[in-house]
Amino acid sequence: MGLGDKIKDLAGQAKEKASPLVSKAKEKTGPLLEKAKEKASPVVEKAKEKTSPVVEKAKKKTSPVVEKAKEKGGELAEKAKTKAGRSDEQSDEEAGTS
């Protein structure tokens, strides 16, 4: 029996011994998890109710700023394209490829 076989054998034994413990842990934590979800649900719903108007208000206040930023960004992008185009033309002229 080689070293690899021995390691596989030990791993298999460990898995067999751990399997019942894992099952027991799942059995015990399952109901606890469900209880936690039930208890937390009303709190989560309240939080959603209270934050929803705040989020909507923030969206309304930031919307004009976002729109202005998009417009300015578009303008700057166009300027950059124009300058890049001129730069390409100048490079072509300097290289004598026009």
Image (cartoon, rainbow, N blue to C red):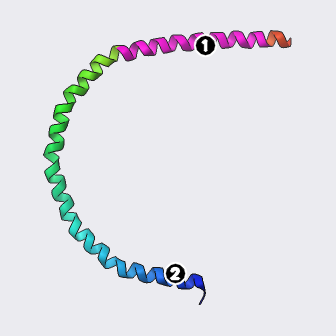
Residue 44 horizontal side relative to residue 75, left or right: left
User: Residue at coordinates 18% horizontally, 58% vertically from top-left?
Assistant: 34
Residue 68 horizontal side relative to residue 43, left or right: right
Query: In the image, residue 92 lies at what x, y percent?
Result: 80, 13
Magenta extent: 65-91
User: Residue at coordinates 17% horizontally, 49% vertically from top-left?
Assistant: 40
Q: Main secondary structure of the magenta part?
A: helix
As for residue 59 lying within the magenta part, the answer is no
| Residue under pointer 2 | 8
Q: CA distance from mark 2 to mark 1?
A: 63 Å
Query: Dot 1: few (<14), some (14–19), or many (≥20) neighbours within 10 Å?
Result: few
| Residue under pointer 1 | 80
User: Residue at coordinates 49% horizontally, 84% vertically from top-left?
Assistant: 9
Q: Which quadrant of the view contains residue 32?
A: bottom left
User: Residue at coordinates 27% horizontally, 18% vertically from top-left?
Assistant: 60
Q: Amino acid at mark 2?
A: Lys
Quadrant housing the C terminus: top right
Residue 91 horizontal side relative to residue 1, left or right: right
Residue 14 appears in view: yes
Query: In the image, residue 27 lies at what x, y percent?
Result: 23, 70
Q: Which quadrant of the view contains residue 62?
A: top left
Q: Is residue 43 above or below residue 51?
A: below
Dot placed on the residue nearer the N-terminal end, 2 or 1: 2
Q: Which quadrant of the view contains residue 83?
A: top right
Q: Is residue 94 above or below residue 6?
A: above
Please tell me whether mark 1 sits on a helix, a strand or a loop. helix
As for residue 75 lying within the magenta part, the answer is yes
Query: Dot 2: few (<14), some (14–19), or many (≥20) neighbours within 10 Å?
Result: few
Mark 2 touches mark 1? (CB < 8 Å)? no
Query: In the image, residue 64 lies at what x, y percent?
Result: 34, 13
Q: Amino acid at mark 1?
A: Ala
